[in-house]
Amino acid sequence: MRKVFLWFSCLSLLVVQCFCSSVVLAQEVYDVVVYGGSSAGVAAAVQAKRMGKSAAIVCPDVHLGGLSSAGLGATDSGDRSVIGGISREFYHRLWKHYQDPKVWNWVPVPNLGMPGQGGRGFDNETQTAWVFEPHVAEMVFEQFVKENDIPVFRGRYLDRMKKDCVEKNGTQIVSIRMKNGEVYRGKMFIDATYEGDLMAAAGVSYTLGRESNDQYGETLNGIQVGHAHHHQFNANTYRGDDKVQDPFIDPYVIPGKPESGLLPYVNPDAGGEDGSADTKLQAYCYRLCMTKVPENRVPFEKPANYDPLNYELFVRSILSGQRFLMIISSMPNGKTDTNNGGPFSHDFIGQNYDYIEADDAEREKICFAHEQWQQGLMWTLQNDPRIPENVRNSYKDWGLAKDEFQDTRHFGHKIYVREGRRMVSDYVHTELHCCRVLPTPRPIGFGSYQMDSHHCQRHVKVLEDGRAIAWNEGDVQVSPGGAYPIDFGTILPKKAECTNLLVPVCVSSSHIAYGSIRMEPVFMILGQSAATTACFAIEDGKAVQDVDYGKLSARLKADGQVIERQLAPPKIANLKLNLIPGIACDEDSAKLEGDWKFNDVTQPRVGKGYMHDDGTKCGTKIATYTLKVPTAGNYEVRLTYPTNPNRATNVPVEIYTADGVKTVYVNQKECAEPPFQTLGTFRFNAGDAKIVISNKNVDGYVILDCVQLLEKK
């Protein structure tokens, strides 16, 4: 197994720790025990020590840093201005390292800060580096640990297949037990694993897979057949110079013959309707550190269990004209961060479903299968004679970097667990929080990356003409339209379940929202915020859920965390009516006079669509909205509508208030806070409030969507 190789290769490092008696370990009580050696785990331990607390990292890992030191050198940073604290310090230390010409041992020293070989991702103005070699990232994490005198117990696996591996006293974790019998006690615990192993063993609620869109009022969650246009089998999207007759790929062993059976790893169908829930996980892979430098290159070998049928779709897609085969990002010293890209690539789609709940031995088998898959993919690309010679030649010089990952066959020491368990707490971060539609009352950090899910499955799709084609499902790449705050509640378990545990990686989030949160800079941000919470909980003798947010936010800001900034307007595609705050009524519930037309082309809006008057300007089309006001008082009246240049600039809206009828004329070409337009604050009596919209004397199209009342106290 992979971890066995790690143990022997790092025997000198582990030998002293391995002979520590579990009795001695059981007697020491750390202030903060961090389980997991990820970037979040290191940031958490460092913050705890800087706040004067004792902290230890206990982890299955031998190498610290998680994916940040396992090949993910092309940082998915998004808006870098919201990355602060220890996270920004990490990227600053990387920048400082590469200022020394002596570290450029494989290529000439580049002009740092400029595009090109090795220079991409260096920001001299902010003194940060966002591209880096794996071993350099690991070196920085080790520096953090050494400088802060943090004990690290490596190669320690939580004995999670046994129910008593976590000792609790009521809602408090007392200790955690490893498979080797060692016991670690703490006042506070932080689960910094990508899988959420400690969280699950402690009895904290979690979920796996994809929620339905209906569960949280989202649009991008659940099965996404219709939305999955990225990294897809369609050569019209990623065509090279070759002419193709048919852009689609046949899914059967013998093309056109269903009786020959489906090619490996292809499902017969998507398993449900778009937007519906399932338990599938977005695909995993290793981030390969490749190079063309001959002296530092390890060639890709043909795997012992190589089966050409596993790569048949790959060959067919290339023959059909596909040329987007993977993402190769340049790193310093002639190396790469190589990631999945295109319809058939490094992601081993559908072969990670059992990983999270599997025992450690089974996880290692799944990891090794992924390694062999990627090895076989590169060998096929470089050697299969059916692949055009010009394509083979463009990849033939690539190999794995010899000076990276020397104890794991030059593959990363960590597979990219893009998504594992996700905690389900009292606060769940959703697509609507990413898009700043719903409020985030207690920010502890920011995210900004696009909502990014890799494909979850490969299946047969039947076209309108009856043809069966191979189709990937699950890939979503949608920008939130700006940076967004992440709430304190995302890292807190339910109070009834655990009161001294924080979860900065497997946060309380929906699947699609996690696709944006799950970036390494954000994990470090949340790790630091979690540790700050833990320290205050110790000092004040409180449950983590009861830590004073004012005190927490002040310390986070003092330590360089970014938790405040001017937000971009909400980005809304299709807001659910039941998530509109206050009193709301949409066009479906309004009394309509005249021939209003339905449409669902323009966004943002509320509900599935909206109504329009077809530009008739006849003055006879009227919509009466009735909203029940529970108590008399002042209410802000807001109208929602999707804007367009063909809209009327003078839509009459009659507001029946306690002080009589007030008429406001609305310019529907524009909207102040899409899709919300404030019409003013008015006094209403308790009972039915009436809002009337018509197309009388208008100069363009009139749109009916939602009317909202917000009480003003």
Image (cartoon, helix red, strand yellow):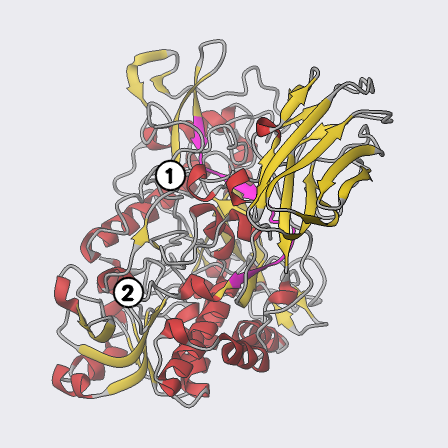
Q: Position of residue 195 (x, y in %)?
A: 32, 57
Q: Position of residue 113 (x, y in %)?
A: 70, 66
Q: Vertically, is 642 above or below 367? A: above
Q: Residues within 10 Å of mark 1 (few under 14, many from 20)?
A: many
Q: Position of residue 632 (x, y in %)?
A: 62, 51
Q: Which sits in the foreground, 547 or 120? A: 547
Q: Which sits in the foreground, 411 or 87? A: 87
Q: Say if residue 571 shows up in the picture.
A: no
Task: Please report the bounds of the magenta region as a residue range.
Answer: 471-486
Q: Say if residue 465 shows up in the picture.
A: yes
Residue underneath mark 1: 349
Residue underneath mark 2: 496
Q: Which sits in the foreground, 160 or 252? A: 160
Q: Residues within 10 Å of mark 2 (few under 14, many from 20)?
A: few
Residue 480 drawn in magenta:
yes
Question: Dot 2: what SS?
Answer: loop
Measure how far apart labels 1 and 2 are at the Cα level: 37 Å
For residue 50, side relative to residue 93 (left or right): left
Label 1 vs label 2, nearer the camera: 2
Q: Which sits in the foreground, 100 or 611? A: 611
Comes first in the chain, label 1 or label 2: 1
Disc 2 marks which amino acid? Answer: Ala
Question: Dot 1: what SS?
Answer: loop
Q: Position of residue 417 (x, y in %)?
A: 38, 53
Disc 1 marks which amino acid? Answer: Ile
What residue is at 29 percent from the left and 85 percent from the top? Answer: 30
Q: Vertically, is 523 above or below 653? A: below
Q: Vertically, is 96 above or below 40? A: below
Asked if disc 1 and disc 2 are in contact, CB closer than 8 Å, the reply is: no
Q: Quadrant for the N terminus, please.
A: bottom left
